[in-house]
Amino acid sequence: MPTKADAAFFRKLTVLVVDDSPEMRRLLAALLESMGVEHVIEARDGLKGLDAFIEHKPDIIITDGAMQPMDGYEMTQRVRAAGAAEGANPDVPILMISGHIGRESVAHARDQGVTDYLPKPLSASVLYEAIVAAVSKPIHFIEKPGYRGPSPTRRLTARSADDSAA
């Protein structure tokens, strides 16, 4: 597993995992820990995720799309609109994990400010590559009335296991 070579990189990260499924939160936490991430914060929905974003100031957010009472799309939009609330970074990379990989779902995620879109079922290699890309290759952010985030015209597609092999 390539994570061994990058242990120092992953050890420094604080990752916020937002998902309404306790099993998915446990799986993501285990995958992150296997990569060397020592600081994993968990939240069960978008509202709790927003609170954790402000309190813990994560380096990266991994969120599900469909949750109640606030989904990952709205949470992403609010993170992007938050400004530098109490020192939290509104430009934080946000990876969305979803079983919905249709063009409309991916475009909606992009339009809310999602950095990368990862399809379920999620593989360790896809998650690894997405984290490295999100943290090491920052995306240019724009700000206009009603929107702050990555350019809504950029191309975003759901990653697949084949992407990590390239």
Image (spheres, grey):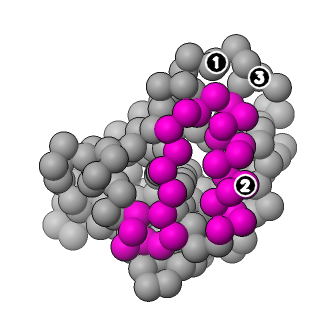
Q: Are marks 3 and 1 in contact (CB under 8 Å)?
A: yes
In this view, 135 is above or below 151: above
Residue 158 in view: no
x, y (%) of residue 116? 55, 51
Give residue 127's quadrant in the image.
Answer: top right
**The residue positioned farthest toward the bottom in the image shown:** 69
Q: Count neighbours of disc 1 (C-alpha within 10 A) and say few if under 14, some if 14 to 19, many if 20 or more.
A: few
Query: Which image quarter holds the C terminus?
Result: top right
User: Residue 27, which numbered label?
Assistant: 2
Q: Are marks 2 and 1 in contact (CB under 8 Å)?
A: no
In what element is the residue under mark 2?
Answer: helix
The residue located at (80%, 61%) in the rendering is 121
**Lower sequence index among marks 2 and 1:** 1
Q: Amino acid at mark 3?
A: Pro
In this picture, residue 15 sits left or right of residue 160: left
Q: Count neighbours of disc 2 (C-alpha within 10 A) and say few if under 14, some if 14 to 19, many if 20 or more.
A: few
In what element is the residue under mark 3?
Answer: helix
Q: Is 165 in front, or is 40?
A: 40
What segment carries the magenta color? Answer: 22-49
